[in-house]
Image (tube, rainbow, N blue to C red):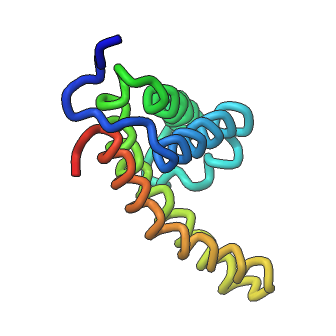
Amino acid sequence: MPDTTPAGTAPLSADVVGLAAILLTSGAIHLLRPEVFEPIVPHLLPYKREIVHGSGVAEIACGLGLLVRPTRRTAGLASATLLAAVFPANVQMTADWARHANRRGDARSRAMLAGTVLRLPLQWPMIRTALRAAGRR
């Protein structure tokens, strides 16, 4: 059978499957428990529930698209864009936990702050994986 992979589309690799799993899981949580994500929508944005639902649908679409060869290129580009677009929410979450940890000073608050700080640089390898899935180096 001839290869019908679009030019430049990467084969399905473990890191792309991992990224798809992260996107699918996160997207499902966005839809099933939007209240978890509403506080990290940057404060200046209105319609927090709608933004959370929309980003959940986008994450699921990207995750599914990464798993299907003919859509992997487009899904890779869309995933990289989505991951960059939600980065401000991750920054907001870190800022919120920093304020919370400063007020409370308890071990849980400090651990949550540390986790959010450590999470920030993880966005970049996920973006690189998405771009590789799209056939970009």
> Toward the viewer: 36 or 74?
74
Q: Which quadrant, please, contains the N terminus?
A: top left
Asked if residue 40 is positioned above or below residue 92 in the image, the reply reads above
Q: Position of residue 113 (x, y in %)?
A: 63, 76
Give the camera-side residue of 104 and 119. 119
At horizontal 47% and vertical 54% (from top left) the residue drawn is 42
Which quadrant of the figure has residue 107?
A: bottom right
In this view, the residue farthest toward the left is 7
Percent x, y for residue 83?
Answer: 41, 49
11 horizontally vs 57: left or right: left
Vertical position of residue 121 compared to residue 8: above or below: below
Q: Which residue is drawn at 22% across and 45% down?
A: 136
Q: Looking at the image, which is closer to me, 56 or 12?
A: 12
Q: Can residue 65 be seen in this view?
A: yes
Q: How many marks?
A: 0
| Residue closest to the far front | 1
Left or right, 28 with reference to 10:
right
Please report the residue visible at 39 percent of the width from the left and 24 percent of the height from the top. Answer: 69
Above or below, 68 relative to 96:
above
Name the residue located 30 percent from the left edge and 29 percent from the top edge. 74
111 lies left or right of 38: right
The answer to whether residue 50 is visible is no
Q: For the view shown, which residue lies furthest in the top direction? A: 1
